[in-house]
Amino acid sequence: MSVNVLFSAHADRWPQYRDLLTSAIITTGVDFNLATDFDPAEVDYVVYAPNSGLRDFAPFARLKAVLSLWAGVESIVGNPTLTVPLARMVDHGLQQGMTEWVTGHVLRHHLGMDRHITGQDGIWRTDVPPLAPSRTVCILGLGELGQAAGKALASLGFNVTGWSRTPKSIPEVTCFDGASGLQTALEGAEILVLLLPDTPATTNILDAKTLAKLPRGAVIINPGRGPLIDDDALLAALGSGHVGHATLDVFRTEPLPPDHPYWSHKRVTVTPHIASETRPETAVLAIAENIRRGEAGEPFLHLVDRTLGY
């Protein structure tokens, strides 16, 4: 019997995914039907974006899994009607995009590019930045994206440290975990990159207390989640000069309101949640593989742990 795959995402995504996803599932050998509308009782898999509007999964009586197109699942993980396996998006495109964005902004701050880009004022500035091995970059969050970014930065010679809630071992990265490990990681972080998920345990992980642990003049780069940072505490640290600059891609409210103080702050760079986007050409391969696994009785990839929230 054919499996029915419901594509539930914003309407403008369907033309981008229809042919690519069809081709990807065909290569798995699974007999399937793919559409944007089915009788819920006849759906086997939902390819899902949290902004699709679908919230009630109770009518999906034979549903086997929900396969998210997004890496972040905080808006769905607590849905009481979702009782089947939930897989988040982890694929080469997301990893590559995040690695490129993080590496670019780390290099920008490491090299002091802003002084020359914005300082076209006739002053011959001869200060030379240190080489990468003399700069410590710390990554909070050592999941798939954090590990990929850490390995790329280490390959450039940076002294890369990282922190995660649970112990990790990554050859290129000096790893810390737990409360004491977080303090140690922050104390050495000249450039701090946030790649943690948004969970109750990570909300405001950067507050006045933890910001004070950073070396004076540290740079913060946040392509992870907006609620990781206490905005008032960050603005205060920027105002005092304890934090030298913050490059922020994610925010508690998006789009960032036009009157938010981040927009006009001289030590803040705002980018519009573009650090890494799900690319249809690579995402469909991850979706198709999980459908194949589901039909073969194999474990799904990148399942969300409901107790942890990611």
Image (cartoon, rainbow, N blue to C red):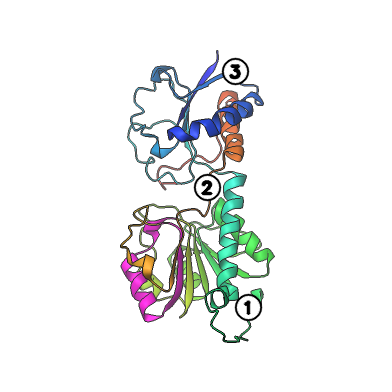
Amino acid marked by disc 3: Asp
Q: Secondary structure at mark 3?
A: loop
Camera-side residue of 105 and 295: 105
Amino acid tagged 2: Glu
Which of the two discs, 2 and 3, labels the residue nearer the N terminus? 3
Which stretch is magenta?
A: 225-250
Q: Secondary structure at mark 2?
A: loop
* Residue 237 located within the stretch drawn in magenta: yes
The reply to whether callout 2 and callout 3 are in contact (CB within 8 Å) is no
Q: Position of residue 210 (x, y in %)?
A: 39, 71
Give me the residue at 50% from left, 68% from top.
192
Residue at 38% in and 71% down: 265
Asked whether, in this view, residue 84 is left or right of residue 34, the answer is left
Residue highlighted by disc 1: 134
Q: Which residue is mark 3?
A: 31
Q: Residues within 10 Å of mark 1 (few under 14, many from 20)?
A: few
In the picture, measured across the screen, residue 201 lies left or right of residue 45, that is: left
Q: Kindly tell me whether residue 299 is visible in this rendering.
A: no
Asked if residue 274 can be seen in this view, the reply is yes
Rounded to the nearest whole Å, what is the CA distance between mark 2 and mark 3? 29 Å
Cα gap from disc 3 to disc 1, whole angstroms? 55 Å
Q: How many badges with numbers are in the image?
A: 3
Vertical placement of residue 293 versus 87, above or below: above
Q: Is residue 85 above or below residue 242?
A: above
| Mark 2 crowdedness (10 Å alpha carbons): few <14, some 14-19, many ≥20 | some
Can you give x and y, in whole percent of width and height, for residue 88 in the image? Answer: 49, 41
Q: Which residue is mark 2?
A: 277
Foreground label between 2 and 1: 2
Rendered location of residue 268, percent (x, y): 43, 69
Alpha carbon distance from label 2 to label 1: 32 Å
